[in-house]
Image (cartoon, rainbow, N blue to C red):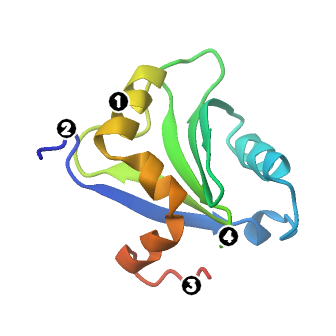
Amino acid sequence: MLQSRGAVRFEPLFTTADIGLRQDASVEHVVKAFLNIGEALASRWIEMPRGILLLQSVPDDPASGAIYLYDRERHIFYFVSFLEGRDDALTAPEFDQLVSEYDLVSRTANPGLLSAHLPEAGLA
């Protein structure tokens, strides 16, 4: 199946420890700290037992979103990027379409599988 933005990649950004959070921090606290770094809000939030998928947007700019996946077990944030097209100026409807088209819910449900497709980043 041809995907509208080409291949998808999950680029590791940082761990919760990298941003000064404890391993036992609540999910709400982790997401709030992440959003504070970008001075953003979560336009969309899909929470699964093992991962969270976010559309992070600038307040009052609905076409400023970027998709991030948080691996709750390994405490790693990933930037979801696409080979073709912009991946940092998304709207909520575009997010919804990409979630469906790229089956991002399955990847959020099993983020541990992402490491099999990533270069060694020193994050564990």
**Spatial distance from mark 4 to mark 1, Cα to Cα?**
27 Å
Hey, which quadrant is residue 98 in on the image? top left
Q: Of callouts 4 and 3, which one flags the residue occurring earlier in the amino acid sequence?
A: 4
Foreground residue, 83 or 76?
76
Q: Which residue is mark 2?
A: 4
| Residue to which mark 4 is pinned | 73
Residue position marked by numbered label 1 in the rendering: 97
> Dot 3 surroundings within 10 Å: few (below 14), some, or many (20 or more)?
few
Position of residue 55 measured from the top left corner of the image (x, y, whole percent): 55, 36
User: What percent of the width, then of the height, locates residue 82?
Assistant: 31, 49
Q: Name the outermost residue toward the top.
A: 60
Which of marks 1 and 4 precedes in the sequence? 4
Q: Quadrant of the C terminus?
A: bottom right
Looking at the rendered structure, the kind of residue marked 2 is Ser
Which residue position holds label 3?
122
Tell me: residue 42, above or below residue 3.
above
Residue drawn at (23%, 42%) of the image: 5
Amino acid residing under circle 4: Glu
Q: Residues within 10 Å of mark 1 (few under 14, many from 20)?
A: few
Label 4, residues with CA under 10 Å away: few <14, some 14-19, many ≥20: few
The residue depicted at 44 percent of the width and 69 percent of the height is 114
